[in-house]
Image (cartoon, rainbow, N blue to C red):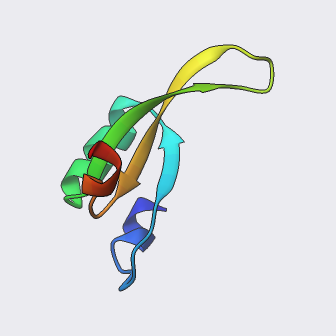
Amino acid sequence: MIKIASKLEGDFLMSYDNTEETRDLASRYEFAIQPIAMKNTHHAKKTELLISQNLDWFLG
């Protein structure tokens, strides 16, 4: 999905599992990433990654 997103011409925002593989792929395609706190359907705490071309709007 990250490889496909690298070919998009418009803006996008996706969330994905916060794994080393995901972070490496996002970095390879020069995407901005930001870990965020989440809860899964069983209310267990975890983190996911926001991935986009630019997260300045989120980071303020």
Question: How far across and down, in percent of the image, does residue 37 sit?
Answer: 51, 25
Q: In the shown orientation, is residue 28 left or right of residue 12?
A: left
Residue furthest to the front in view is 60
Q: Is residue 11 above or below residue 36?
A: below
Question: How far across and down, in percent of the image, does residue 25 sit?
Answer: 30, 50
Q: Is residue 14 above or below residue 34?
A: below
Question: How far across and down, in percent of the image, does residue 28 sit?
Answer: 20, 54
Q: Quadrant of residue 24?
A: top left
* Residue at (49, 62) in percent of width and height: 1
Q: In the shown orientation, is residue 33 left or right of residue 36?
A: left
Q: Is residue 27 above or below residue 35?
A: below
Q: Nearer the viewer, residue 25 or 40?
A: 40
Question: How far across and down, in percent of the image, does residue 34 sit?
Answer: 33, 39
Residue furthest to the top in view is 44
Q: Quadrant of residue 40?
A: top right
* Residue at (38, 52) in percent of width and height: 51
Residue furthest to the right in view is 42
* Residue at (34, 31) in percent of width and height: 20
Q: Is residue 12 above or below residue 55?
A: below
